[in-house]
Structure formats: structure tokens, C-alpha cells
Amino acid sequence: MATIATIQLPEGDQRVIKIKPGDHVEKTFTVSNIYGSQLRIGFQCQFDKPEQKKWAKPKEPVERDFGDQGSEQVKLEIQIPKDAVPGKYNLKLLVYSLKDPNLDFTLSDPIVVEVTAVDAIAPKPKQIWPWIVAGVTTLLIIGVVTWILLPTNVIIPNLVGKPIDEVTTLLEGKKIPLGEVTEERTGKAQVGEVLSQSPAADTTVKKSDLKPIKLVVEIFSVGVPDVKGMTVTQAQHEFKLNGLKLGAVNEQKTGSAPGGTVLKTDPEIGTRVAPDAEIMLSVETQSVIIPSVAGQLLTQAKPVLEGLGLMVQVELVKTGAQGLHVLSTRPVSATAVKPGSTVVLVVEKQMLSIPNFSGQNLDSVVNQLNNMNLRLGAVRRVFVIGRSTNTVLSHIPAAGASVDPLTPLTFIVTQGSSTIYPYKAVISPTFNMKSINTLGVIRREVAPLVAPEKQ
């Protein structure tokens, strides 16, 4: 399977479309050819379910010729049926090669088509606190006016465990004024349930001594916390601590904040909302612009891309250009991608001849490998009599071999004498030290991790 294109929304465009049943909107994508040659391509809209396929379609032409590294605007017409069920639906744009659509295609990131109820374009999180406050205010007014009508003695009812809306109705019927209502989060009661009261239940109070009743209620509204400048993950954690949920996240490019940080919330910071309400975020666009590295050496271009937080893959081709120089990138330069995205460096192939590293220090060899576009592979350490630590004994492939760039080399390297478990060499009288060093006789391949107990 091959990716043939990049598919992007215009700068700052939203990935959430809110639309009523029966309405229609248009959405424009920018499609860029990264296949490496001219293509004959087609477009298709995809929803989560097959029966939603007719909700969107590309505007004509749906098939067209696409030049190498060219970019074109593709408009989608989104038409929602009048009988569509309100909800959120994922829409993707499929770009495929007509020559081999099963192998050569690209599928865009989803955009969310939010079908709203006919009588509401942008439903807000359900807020129960305003009517509670209104009810409290009304009771206070009624309480003052009707206080003189109370009987001589009043028995305070048991309000603990009852929801606040039921309590306000009960007190209003008994003509008992409601005083201060304090919210508290315990997690042991339902939202808006009375936790305690003052005076206590069944208390008999004279009319002359009766004061507005005070309640402590399980929290029934939450202020949207200040998450401006936080990352999405940090904001989500803050919402969780306050009993709220993270809603849709929309990217905007303002240049006023670091990429990926919160610009604002919806509802706004400080707004009182119901527990479990979803809070939407506007976040500064987080993207990396791929620089132009064509013509640079592989050893120059690779660190530049990695320094921008991108992953690098190398593709070697033979065109006759200067060896080990970058010919192009996929995606092409100036493309905006997310940090951590993979960029393919198309590099002119050149076979490398491996020098003789035997006898050199491994640290020095590693620096040479980087400069030669080779890689350090496995390292085996062995004990050899008469050799200093970290000296290269041999390597695979051997000196003189012709290999591709970035080929990993395996090294056999000396390891110094163990202070935990020194090895005592036994030398045959028929060999002298010089001959043993020349042959590279290995006395022990792997040092013991723990010295054996003395008997």
C-alpha cells in the first residue's frame, strides 16, 4: 500500500461542522500529490455507516489528472437529510489512484459533522443552577412577606437526602424561609441532594425565633476552571478534578501562544455549569513546517529534521546524481505536519567501502561511522590478553566490503580485566605472548555478572 497524497484543511478552518437537518454546507480540502509521479485520481466521501454515504459528495470533477507534487482544491458538498437523527458523525475524504485503488490511496483525518436539533444550533451544557438561584430568591421574598402568617410553633421538616428542587417546593408549601445554601462535594450523594440542615429535623421553633433555614447541598454547579495556557492533557486533568468532561478540541492559528496550548474555553472560564458538562477548547495550532533540504548531504539533512521533532526514514535511489545527497522529501518541503510525523528523505545511492577499524578505540570509530553515513550495530565484548579496553578486534562486514549507506556494523571489542572475577590465563609453553596477541586468542567471551562464592 502506498500513500499518494496529503489532505489538509485551510489554515485555521474548524474540524467540527454544526448543521441542521435539511441544510447543506461546503467544505474545502487541499490535496497535494506526494506519490512521485503523475496520477489519475478519484475522490470519495466516507461516513461511519454506509447509509450516510449520500450525505456528502465531492463537487465535479470527481476524477482528474494530478501532476507530480501538484496541489488542488477539492470541495465537498454536505447535505443532511431532514429526517437525520441529531448526533456527531465522522466524515473522511478518500483520495485513490484509478490505476490501483486498493493499494494506492490516502484517507484524510476525520472532520466531525454535528447534526443539531431543529430548534437549537449550538446546544450548551445543561445548567441547573440558574433556576435554583431563581427559586432561592423567590423563596426569600416569599419568606419575608409570609413570615407573619406562620403559626406560633413551627416543626422543621427533615430535608436531608432530598433533592434541592423538591426541598424548595416543600419549604414554600410550609411557608418556611430558605436561607443560605452552601455547596459541598462529598461524592457520597446525588448532585443537588441535601447533606445537612440547620435547624435540625423535627426541631420545634417559635414563630418569633424562626430564622431562614440553612442547607448544605451536594454540589450542583461547577465553575469552568482557568485552563488558559495549559496543554490539552493538563486541561482535561483539571476538568476531571472539577467533575467536568473534555468536549471538542478545535485548533486555531493566532501566533499568540505556544503550539498545542489552550486559548479559550466554551463556555467561558468562570461560567457556572452542571457537573459532568462537556467543555470545548480552542487550542493554538501545533504544527511543523518541513524545511527544504534538497541538495544537502544525508548527514546534514537528517539532524535538521530530527531537531524539529520529526521522524526520518531514508529511501535510496539511483539516478546518477551526486552520491548521498538529498533529492527530495515526502511530504514535500513547506508542508505543515504534526510533531513526530515521519518524513522520507529520498537520497542518491552510493556504495561505501568499509575501512579497517581493527586496533582503533571504539569511541573514535563511532564518530567515523557517523561521518561516513554508516551505523553502529551490535557490540560484543570479550577478554583478550595484552589488549587495552575498548579496542576493536574485528568487525562485520570486514574491511574492504562495499555496502549501502546506513548499513549497521557489528564490532568485536576488548573488555578489561574484571575486578570482581579476574581471569587467570593459562598459556601453553609452545606459544609466546606475541603469537597469542596476533591470533587474538579469546579467553572468556562474557564476563560473569556476579563473582562466584569462595569455597
Image (cartoon, rainbow, N blue to C red):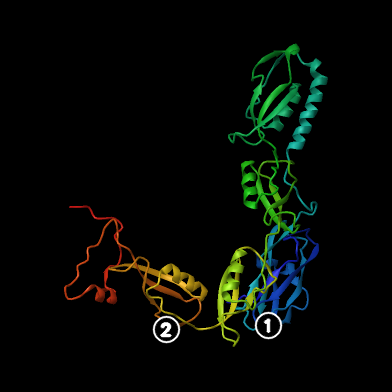
Camera sees residue 46: no
Mark seen at residue 347: none
Camera sees residue 181: yes
State the residue position of label 2.
Answer: 400
Which quadrant of the structure image shows residue 62? bottom right
| Residue kind at label 2, given as amino acid type | Gly
Observer-nearest residue: 266 or 286? Answer: 286
Observer-nearest residue: 100 or 36? Answer: 36
Residue 36's x, y, as percent? 64, 81
Where does the N terminus fall, quadrant-wise? bottom right
Which residue appears farthest toward the bottom when viewing the image? 320
State the residue position of label 1.
Answer: 39
Residue 212's x, y, as percent? 74, 20
Q: Secondary structure at mark 2?
A: loop
Task: Please state if 431 lies on the left or on the right of 261 as rendered.
Answer: left
Q: Nearer the viewer, mark 2 or mark 1?
A: 2
Residue 345's x, y, as percent? 59, 75
Q: Secondary structure at mark 1?
A: strand
Which quadrant of the structure image shows residue 153? top right
Residue 8's x, y, as percent? 71, 68
